[in-house]
Image (cartoon, rainbow, N blue to C red):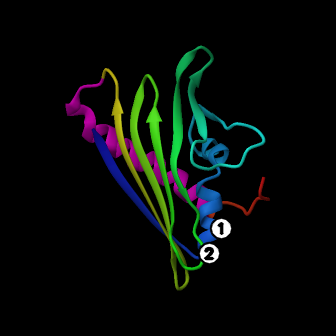
Amino acid sequence: MAVFRIERFTSLPAAEAWRRVTDWERHAAHVPLTRISVPAGQPTGTGTVFVARTGVGPLGFDDPMEVVRWTPPEAGRAGLCRLEKRGSVVLGRASIDVYPTECGSHVVWVEELRVRLLPQWGDPLIAGSGRRLFGRVLVGLLDGPVLPHR
């Protein structure tokens, strides 16, 4: 299993950092050839399932994810989000934690991925690529323009 960790400090308050990093549809703006579908009309919470579709036309794959823990930050407490990846290509877990700090917040994103049909010796390559890709996603989400809450 490929494992990688990304950390980022931001001047954003924990609640705003949380809102940005858990706005799943906005993740797609920072991942090439990917779009994300979230059920309409329901707020994200434990049990929410959303799908990242990566590819072009019929050449691609779905990466369904379920939120298995959802604890937004409040009153000085960290926000904790846990996802289970249950696709036919990508399996594993992700955690996104947002810790309040004196001057903003500290975001820690950890992914544990297994890509079906890829041998275990490829895990370091997947981890390195994932660290770079998701690092860019995190920078884009936290440093991007302030957008209205949906």
Q: Residue 19: x and y, percent?
A: 65, 60
Q: Position of residue 41 (x, y in %)?
A: 78, 42
Q: Which residue is mark 1?
A: 16
Image position, residue 113 (x, y; %): 36, 38
Q: Position of residue 112 (x, y in %)?
A: 35, 44
Residue found at the very far front of the displayed protein: 47
Q: Nearer the viewer, residue 43 or 146?
A: 43
| Tag shown at residue 13 | 2
What's the amino acid at mark 1?
Glu
**Element under disc 1:** helix
Q: Classify residue 29 as left or right of residue 108.
A: right
Instruction: Using the rendered view, name the quadrant where residue 123 is placed.
Output: top left
Question: Looking at the image, is 9 positioned above or below residue 124?
Answer: below
Instruction: Name the residue located 60 percent from the left edge and 21 percent from the top edge.
Output: 56
Stretch of the chain drawn in magenta: 118-142
Q: Is residue 62 above or below residue 138?
A: above
Q: Residue furthest left?
A: 121
For badge 2, the amino acid type reads: Pro
Q: Residue at x 64, y 58 (%)?
A: 20
Query: In this orientation, which residue lies closer to the viewer: 50 or 52?
Result: 50
Q: In percent of the image, x 41 and y 58: which residue is there? A: 6
- Element type at marker 2? loop
Q: 123 above or below 10?
A: above
The correct choice, above or below, for 125 with respect to 61 in the image is: below
